[in-house]
Amino acid sequence: MLIELGRKGEAKQVQHLPIGSLKAYGTNPFGDATFRVIWSESRTYMVGANHVDYDGDMANEKMVKAHGGKDPNVRRQTSEYRWLPLYPAAKCWILEQWKSGIAFTGCTPAQYYERYLDPRSGLLTLGPYPDRGEYTECFRFPSEPPISAVVRVINAIRAGWNYSVEEHRKAIESEQEAKKKASADRAQDIFLDSQQAFKNRPSNIRPGKRTKEQVIIRKTAEQVGLHQRGFSTGAPPAQ
């Protein structure tokens, strides 16, 4: 469900983590910091489309048919730009990194208008081309981070810029192998913990676990006159 936040020009004010400027870790061509930490609920993005507003919920199929194929709950239909939440399910501090317009969209302004212009509404479905670039998500902090935690993440990201594609691939494979080994080691530990002491080998405190073939039954319960419950496996003891 689309959550309306406002018309064009009414974007929410982005809430920044109060840790000061991060320009020391890079700036973009417009003099803004390459990295920033923002509160997730303050971030929005623009969409252009034919929007339908309802009084309550959409009518069911039976009600629509009863009104000649029209939804009686429709209050207004408009073609306009609206601001929507960028991180609708998140409530946390997020590190974002600036990307140029072409890096963010993957196309030139001309290609962008060709791809995203909606012929019905005459609007660009993802809003105007980001001539000044756009910030994208890098990392989500589980709690409000101190400046030291932010810097550690930024430095790790910046360090990754010096690696080739092949080096990134090998690093990912190495991490996956490490996870597989950790999972196998954990399974082995669980198995060993479920075993008797000394892996069932004889010791001075445990002579060793015997198998059922090694257990010799010399007399049955009936033969020694033990009380039986349920089924009897032989004749009752003589009185």
Image: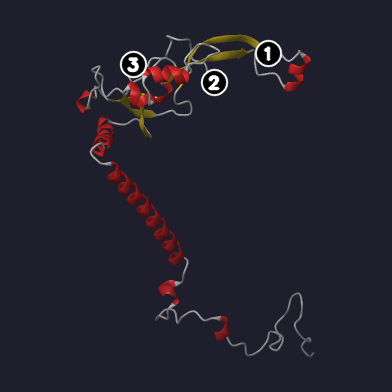
Locate residue 118, reporting x and y percent.
51, 16
Taking 88 as reference, is 21 left or right? left
Q: Residues within 10 Å of mark 1 (few under 14, many from 20)?
A: some
Nearer to us of marks 3 and 1 is: 3
Secondary-structure class at tag 3: loop
Query: Relative to residue 62, is residue 165 depicted above or below?
Result: below
Disc 1 marks which residue? 73
Secondary-structure class at tag 1: loop
Tell me which amino acid carries mark 2. Answer: Leu
Among the 4 quarters of the image, the one containing residue 212: bottom right
Among the 4 quarters of the image, the one containing residue 128: top left
Could you say which disc has been placed on residue 131 in the image? 3
Q: Residues within 10 Å of mark 2 (few under 14, many from 20)?
A: few
Proximity of marks 3 and 1: CB atoms separated by less than 8 Å: no
- N-terminal of the two: label 2 or label 3? 2
Tell me which amino acid carries mark 3. Answer: Asp
- N-terminal of the two: label 1 or label 2? 2
Structural distance between the alpha carbons of marks 2 and 3: 26 Å
The front one of 100 and 235 is: 100
